[in-house]
Amino acid sequence: MELHHGKHHQTYITNLNAALKTQAEAVHTSDITTQVSLQAAIKFNAGGHINHSLFWQNLAPASSAEAKGSAAPQLVKQIKETWGDEEKFREAFKAALLGIQGSGWGWLVKVEIGNEQRLSIVTTKDQDPVVGKGEVPIFGVDMWEHAYYLQYLNGKAAYVENIWNVINWKTAEERFVGTRADAFKILKASI
Amino acid sequence: MNSTLLRTTAVRSALRAAAPSASKRAGLAGTTFVRGKATLPDLPYDYGALEPAISGKIMELHHKNHHNTYVTSYNNFITQLEEAQASSSIEAIQKQIALKPLINFHGGGHINHSLFWENLAPTSQGGGEPPTGKLASVINESYGSLDAFKEKFNTALAGIQGSGWAWLVQDVQTGAVGIRTYANQDPVVGQFRPILGIDAWEHAYYLQYQNRKAEYFKAIWDVVNWKTAEQRLK
């Protein structure tokens, strides 16, 4: 956790700020070529910042009340309606996480279609963030090797199994009942 | 153990589960009734032989666990593909197509690591000794010097977003060499021929270097086997 937060997350922020600074200069000088060439670096580093910021918030110590499913009554109700029961949802989420080829993330996402709200499991590669129209990230699990390698080595199935003990269901519930802007509030506060 | 037994899935699974059974399976693969199974190759040096550039612990996990998983998964999906190819129904074709990304990933992982082990060597066996002959000439012509080439290569490695590899490749049509990066386990096939590859997955360095991957990229040149690279160049 210390390396992940103090080094990896910090590097995304440092590189994002550098890319945004260069971009501001390129905008000022109407240098469109440079602006376009910066987009991949901005997406990657901004994605890394967004993903990790959401991730820390959707984890909680295993002994806390937040780590219990009972902290998310409305979300758990919809999970049961969508997947049948919590166990089937966990199995589906685990399969999605273990199916990622290379670095990436798995997310439980709320998708707003008209007046309807549906839950969905999505995986994203590298640091691609969940920022699509009408998508609200509920909770995410980091499947980069740096997230588990020092403890689990190549045993990523055990990491995926144990992460359930530290999911912050209170945060998940807040994101589920809230809006997209609410979920990303942490970013505004930290910039 | 007879041929009838080996055909059963249960025995195949048991063989796969019994890692590291490279030598045992290599022996079995030599007989006629186990058709074309990929096997985990032995390393041409000890796990600890690349220290201090790469720790013995990393090499052991990387070879015995990571590479072996690619081998067993590749064999598993190829078996499924063979079964799916027995029919040309819509469902069978769907299954065949669905298996392609898995074969690319695990087959690629097997190929990449097999090439990687061979293009490394302990310093006592020539690791780090600069290239000679035609390879030395093309690197100098294309990059100015070996040091300038390494710098470009390390920049390419550092620029990989996520898991992947950087390769010195040769264009099979023009013969020109170049540096290319590949995502995840995408193998160097088609227009390009792999000459020298460096693994930029976090599992390749994390236990020793953690987030300081630039140090790993710098150190690995001490154990690059340029002789192998020379043999791959045409």
Image: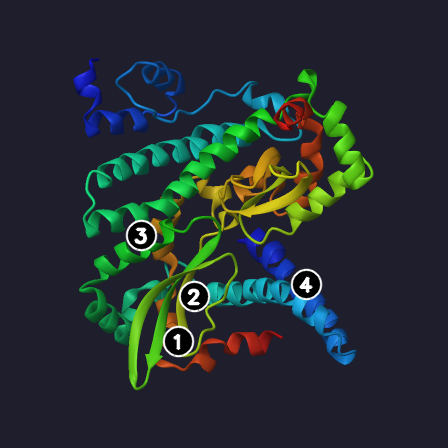
The residue identified by callout 3 is: A95
Q: Is residue B224 above or below residue B144?
A: above
Mark 1–mark 2 CB contact (< 8 Å): yes
Q: Most extreme residue toward the right, as rendered?
A: B144
First-in-chain label (1 vs 2): 2
Label annotation for residue A58: 2
Residue B128 coordinates in the image, percent (x, y): 72, 26
- At mark 1, the secondary structure is helix
User: Label 1 lies in what chain?
Assistant: A
- At mark 2, the secondary structure is loop
Q: Please report the residue visible at 20 percent of the width from the left and 51 percent of the height from the top.
A: B91
Q: CA distance from mark 1 to mark 4?
A: 27 Å
The residue identified by callout 4 is: A14
First-in-chain label (4 vs 2): 4
First-in-chain label (1 vs 4): 4
Q: CA distance from mark 3 to mark 2?
A: 20 Å
Residue type for callout 2: Asn
Q: Nearer the viewer, residue B152 or B203?
A: B152
Label annotation for residue A175: 1
Residue type for callout 3: Ala
Task: Rate crowding at label 4 as few (under 14), some (14 to 19) or many (20 or more) other CA atoms within 10 Å.
Answer: few
Do marks 1 and 2 share a chain? yes
First-in-chain label (3 vs 2): 2
Residue type for callout 4: Thr
